[in-house]
Image (tube, rainbow, N blue to C red):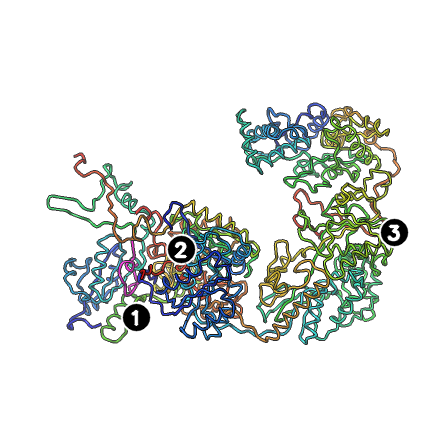
Amino acid sequence: MTKHNGSKPEVQERIGVYVCHCGTNIAGTVDVVQVAEWAASRLKTRGVVIARDYKFMCSSLGQELIEKDIKELGLTRVVVAACSPHLHEKTFRTACARAGLNPFLCEMVSIREQVSWVHTDKEAATIKSQAAVSGGVERVIHHEALEPLTVPINPATLVVGGGIAGIQATLEIADAGHHVYMVEREPSIGGHMAQFDKTFPTLDCAACILTPKMVDVGGHPNVTLMTWSEVEKVEGYVGNFSVTVRKKARHVKTEDCTGCGICQEKCPKKVIDEIYEAGLGYRKAIYTPFPQAVPRFPVMDVDNCIYFEKGTCKACEKFCPTNAINFDQQDEIVTLEVGNIILATGYDIFDARRVSNYGYGRLANVFTSLEMERLTNAAGPTNGNIVLRDGKTVPEAVGIIHCVGSRDRNFNNHCSVICCMQSLKFAHMVHERTGAIVYNFYIDMRTPFKDYDEFYQRVMEEGTLFVRGKVAEVTDATRLPGEEGKLIIQVEDTLAGKQRRIPVDMVVLSVGLQPRQDSNETAKLFGISCSANGWFIEKHPKLDPVATMTEGIYIAGCAQGPKDIPASVSQGAAAAARVLGKIEQKEMALEPVRASVIEEKCSGCRICNDLCPFNAITFHEDRMVTEINAALCQGCGTCVAACPAGAIYGTGFNNEQVLAQIEGLLLLNVGDEPVPA
Amino acid sequence: MNNNEIFEPTIIGFTCNWCSYRAADLAGTARIKYPPNIRLIRLMCSGRLDPTFVFKALASGADGVMITGCHPGECHYLEQNYKALRRFHLIRRTLKGFGVEPGRVKLVWASAAEGAKFASETAVFIEEIRALGPLHWGKSNGYTPFGGKPPEFEPAPESPEEVPA
Amino acid sequence: MTAPNGKKPKFAMYWAASCGGCEIAVLNIHEKILDVDANFEVVFWPVAMDAKYKDVEAMEDGSILLTLFNGGIRNDENEHIARLLRRKSQILVAFGSCACEGCIPGLANFSPAGEIVHTAFNTVSTDNPHQIYPRTSFDVPEGEITIPKIYPTLRTLDQVVDVDYYMPGCPPESHQIAAVIDLVIQVLQGKAELPPKGATIGAGDSTVCDECTRKRNVKTIKSFHRIYDLDIDPELCLLEQGIPCNGPATRSGCNARCVSAGAQCIGCYGPAEGVVDYGARLIAAFASVIDSNDPEEIEAILDGIPDPAGQFYRFNLAGSLLKAAKPAWEKA
Amino acid sequence: MAKYLFYPGCSMESSAKAYSDSLMAVAGPIGLELEEVEDWNCCGATEYLGISLTPAYALISRNLALASKQANGNRTVVAPCSACYLNLAKADYYMQEQPKLGVMVNEALKAGGLSYKPGTLSIRHLLDVMVYDIGLDTIKSKVVRPLTGLRVAPYLGCMVPRPDYENRWSDHEYPIELDLLLNALGAEVIDFPLKTHCCGGHMPHIGPDTAFELIRRLISSAATYETDIMATLCPMCQMNLDAYQGETNRHFGTNYHMPVVFFTQLMGLAFGLDPKDIGFGSELVSARKALNKVGLEAPELVEAAPARPRKAEGLPMPRPLPTRGPQRAKKDEVAK
């Protein structure tokens, strides 16, 4: 029954209030001494037995203040008015625990981020701090001692994405002796790096340093490699994820196939390879993306295979020495049980066709950087010869344009980190292989890491002509004599201070990096969030770049933002280290903030049954009662608020606590002015 | 409320731990100033918001309530802010039945990166409530809440004698 | 809990701002009324016997063992008698939804007292050309005659005096009243213990769905309707058919009498145990299961409940957190 | 029957009479119903806005005020001339963006008992309406005499696609709407590189040699691809290229002969109308040779003219972006 009358019952709790100066961060705007005195006098009737203010509550001395008071004054509740709970809630909870008080009987009140730093009126800020402390005190009265819920951690790990970041993470974990499932969407692992020819600044051949790692992954006893597969569903929580993976049909029996490649030779159907050859080269209907592919089993492209079109051909089946071809192989659904997940899903390159005034897709001899990588690659369509679109003529003048689609309000605002160095690499390669004149059109030359700038100076010494200016247009409309048959780059040379029209034979667009086209869906699938343009959001941009808000889900490489290969590798290793840390713990303490159904009160009305995206809520037909699986429950409290009978109890954020906090914030139960002595 | 002439509203704000509370924190670290009239309560998710909290705040002296959470589609718990959205609509309709201007309860989505937006939306809402004037549920010109001293209630001016025969 | 000097303990019943239905409900316990007569001495029951206020005032304090007080506190007479009976009774029971929550008379809290008087004395149904309104006090040769003054808002019993027990229902089911009478008798005979002070008696501890026999599935509501708009499937839960049934939030105890008769529960047994605001529970429940994430579509679906304040606070307006609409107390 | 408010503009009655005759001739068959805005006045073309803003915007907005009064249901105003379209669109857009301008303009209009609430009208160019409302299929279905063999260079000029306030065109730099329309007429459309480069506008009066240089660039580029005829949709561009082609030839000592007509005239031809009725003959650089190419039942064989070097056997070209229609994609599109 809704009881209305009756004054507040006498408070039995013994509460300690601690107001932090935080140097001048709080004390600069809030009269902390006055807030402490106010709490001691006006909240005495609400159980406050001691109220102190101290310069740095989070310091060890500050924490000792709390511990001493708990022991000597027998405090049963602690309220700390300081910075944000996201920073030091754990600090003060552990301090209370050290003094024998259950950590969940401590409540933090934010008077820095939400008061002193955002208000200027000192008096109003002090009143607001008093209200916040009163809210905290009223709330903490209703806190209960809670024990964290421990769940076992499954030592297996899922790595999504077989690029260099994913490979590094997989090897680190597998070498540490734990099982790793790697799921890769393409037929082979290797990611974008496998498409490159040389890497900057060392000019190592990309394949030479990548393929050994790929082979390690392919052959590692602790790794189950699933290429040509995609994650379809993720359920569960940290330590106990169950992941549904669809292994798309390769139409090749991997147990029999030896990777000899005869089927690729004999297959009559030639198709433009959009992915690996970036549209410059061809592949067959049955193919492995590149010779050093791992795994080496080919994949049948059903959209272009003649058999699937007209039911004829079957050349691959005829010539396969181990008859490993199986046309009616079906997709296979596999469920993996893993403890942690690392997302290393990589990036997409910017679609250069969107910059219509650079003419990519209209003017034959305009290439993107990925196409240039294939041109310079010995295993590429032109066996490493840098030639024009006709496949024969060697260019005499090449223009390389930086920041295509990056640092541009019309397209991508961000700087894509690697295009400057990549463009310098191309300049060097063109010099080395063709002796052509090379122009680099840049707005700012960004060469920040080790040996990067030295590489830039070396390219300058080789005679590359640097023009500082944003290219306005690439056109084949000749105007001045000597421009016939050439591509003219119209640019304002900001150092020379004049417009220039530079005729070249070939233009290379250094396109930027951007998030995967489907990064939003992927984020939703794994329960993490994306930034506005699509990069995965890390737990903290500076201090926690590989973790996410969701426990047990980590991110590495370009999925988190544009970066170069060394950074991707180190993030892969960092994510692996975090996972190994979790595995070492064997079990994990989950926040005890959960929901639970009070059975006698539940009338089985089933209003709550459909409200939980983590399917923690199950209905028992026999007893006509609902039950919540505490391990699956993430503690969001939506069902607690929705239950019409008030039969679902939410620890940590129950109704009494929030209603009391409201009364406290509105200063309803403040004792009257102390009579001046 | 201090009794000088400008009315300083008191507003209770409900924030969700993962987005709008962090937006408020970010407004702090970025030192973005906004008026002190709002007092924030941290819930785990905007889905935890119970209409009881809104009515309790309004009945206990708040002049306005601001409900904040992650943008639809970006909820840390995937879709729970949609339930907050649905409840918000029904809360406003019910409050209209109580004669409360719907403008006194506002829903604002703010992601963890939108400290500036949180501060500006708060400042705008405070001015909107200042325009609507004090709510002071149950109190009117010193009258004790809900009953107590019966008012002198004399609707009829003239006495029965003037009634024509 | 012994009756003074061995005589039968005194029993009183009073009706303040109510419809008298609770009185009839007491008579509805059929022959059980004889037990009442056998075990209690009815000293004050305005509808049933001619006892005067001064008789009650003459009694000693606490001399009445059990008082069943139904009706809300609308005017100063109600308040006066409520305080009087509190002084005179050991056990004061807020009997019925009016005393517990304000019930239908409590709906007056949606409009200012002036408007209520105007509607009563000067509208279409009442021809009042000369604007004659009642005067709360008036001098006549014999002296001053008065009638009770109405308060700006109706209050529940426990907003005025301390209440021992609550018996919800509009009216409380006769089998529940009989059960309470038996309980008190057993307590008198020392065979049973009184429940803790402030408890709700004569009702269940879950909600109406507990006693409802209709089939229930997962709830996703596409639209709300009035019950006569559809032909109702007798077996299936009404809420799933789009009828805003208050059953999930209303305390059980009535054996889902209305729902089993094919009508939606309108919430007369009040909120479940420990709930602070009944209407808020329904708002949260109904809104959460609306099957749409688009604001316009949500608004369209909510148009199916034209008067949410009335729908959710039909019986519990005075007992809710907000208690009354702004116009009611604003100009008081 | 699509119904539109029609703002003809001054040129349609004088220098661009051919545009007006051909438009009125083709409007019927394709079901384009144009209701002229009563008592419209000059839009100030490119000069007035350069002199002083508020009176210029007031002059333009008078037309908008008249049109909104006459809107009766359809709120789309169609302008065939680029300068009129741009000025009307600019006035409406800036009045929404800067309310102060709206206030000053309405104050001026009050003198004539008129007012205009910015945003009530949707201002569109004739080509936009032809391609996206009437639709290419309707136009194709009306083609009686396809312009096979006629090499046409589509020239939009610089005012129509930029600034594209309402994202009406497929691209700011290289819109393809005119190409699509001419293709629908059966003509052989040149991929003209300077399709949105400036024709000099009112520069012939102010800086003739700059104007002549700009005109030379357009004509010479079209000539390199042996264009038979240039199709444009702006009276000012037509006049500059047509009237000043002779002086440009004398200025540079060249002897280009590049006829420049309005795309509606080519539509008229394709619909089988008589050239005289659709303004042919009024152009200064005669289009007779181009007409013969089309007039004759079987145009004589012409050896393949040097096309712009596109197809190379060696390496495959990337697929062009799918035609996006008016609304530009926020993120880039990967052709499925």
Q: Disc 2 on helix, strand or loop?
A: helix
Residue A673 seen: yes
- Label 2 vs label 3, nearer the camera: 3
Q: Are marks 3 and 1 on the same chain?
A: no
Mark nearest the camera among 3 and 1 is: 3
- Chain letter belonging to callout 3: A
Q: Are marks 1 and 2 on the same chain?
A: no
Residue positioned 67% across, 74% down in the render: A179
Q: Secondary structure at mark 1?
A: loop
- The residue where tag 2 is placed is B55
**Along the line of sight, the residue nearer the viewer: C7 or C32:** C7
On the image, the x and y values in percent for residue D310 come to: 82, 45
- Which amino acid lies under the numbered mark 1 shown in the image of this protein? Pro
Q: Find numbered disc 3 in the image and state the secondary structure of the residue it sits on.
A: loop
Mark 1 and mark 2 residues within 8 Å of each other at the beta carbon: no
Residue D123 is situated, as x and y percent measured from the top left of the image, at: 62, 35
Question: Is residue C3 positioned above or below A134 on the image?
Answer: below
What is the residue that sits farthest to the left in this orientation?
A: C142
Q: Which mark is residue C145?
A: none
Distance (Cα) linking label 1 and label 2: 31 Å
Q: Residue C195, which numbered label?
A: 1
Residues drawn in magenta: C154-174
Q: Residue at x 30, y 70 (%)?
A: C195
Report the Cα–Cα distance between label 3 and label 1. Answer: 99 Å
In this image, A103 relative to A399: left or right? left
Mark linked to residue A394: 3
Query: Does the magenta segment cover residue C208?
Result: no
Query: Which chain does the residue under circle 1 lie in?
Result: C
